[in-house]
Amino acid sequence: MVIGCGALVLGGPIGVSLVANLIRQRGFGKRSLRLLVVGGIVASGAIFLFGGPAFHRLFPPPHDPVLASGRGLDLRGSWFWLAARAGGALTFAIALAYGVDLGRLRRSRQAARQTNATR
C-alpha cells in the first residue's frame, strides 16, 4: 500500500521532470514546450481523477469481517485517493513550473543568438 501511494504521488512529477530535462538537453521550440505543459496538465488530471480508483481496484484491501459487517469505519482504501489527489496537484504544479522555466530559457537562448548575430 505504501508503494502504491508513493507511485501515485511521485510517478507523475518524476515523469514530467524527465521529459522536461530531455527537452532542455535538445533544441526545443514553442511546440515542444506547449506539449510539455498540456501533457503535464492532462496527466495531472488523469492521476487526480483515475489514479485512486485504479489503484484501489489493482490492490484491494484485504477482507475484514468486522469492517465488512458495518461495525467500523473502513478507511484503508482512502490512502490511494488522497495520494492520487496529491500526485495530481504536484504533477500540475511541476508541469507549470517547468513550462515557465523552459520558456525563460528558450527566450534567453534566442536573445543570445540575436546578439551574436548582430556582432
Image (cartoon, rainbow, N blue to C red):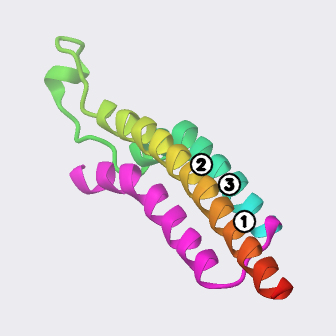
Camera-side residue of 99 and 104: 104
Q: CA distance from mark 1 to mark 3?
A: 17 Å
Q: Is residue 61 left or right of residue 10?
A: left
Labels 2 and 3 touching (C-beta < 8 A): yes
Query: Looking at the picture, how far across and down is residue 78, in whole percent?
Result: 32, 30
Q: Main secondary structure of the magenta part?
A: helix
Q: Residue at x 48, y 56 (%)?
A: 12
Question: Comparing marks 1 and 2, which lies closer to the viewer?
Answer: 1
Which of pointers 1 and 3 lies earlier in the amino acid sequence? 3
Nearest-to-viewer mark from 1 and 3: 1
**Residue 27 drawn in magenta:** yes
Where 8 falls versus 48 (above or below)? below
The residue where tag 3 is placed is 37
Q: Amino acid at mark 3?
A: Val
Q: Nearer the viewer, residue 97 or 78?
A: 97
State which region is magenta. 1-30
| Mark 1, residue position | 107
Q: Residue at x 57, y 46 (%)?
A: 44
Q: Pointer 2: what residue?
A: 96
| Image quadrant containing the C terminus | bottom right
> Mark on residue 94?
none
The image shows residue 28, relative to residue 65, as above or below, that is below
Residue in the picture at 62% in, 53% down: 100
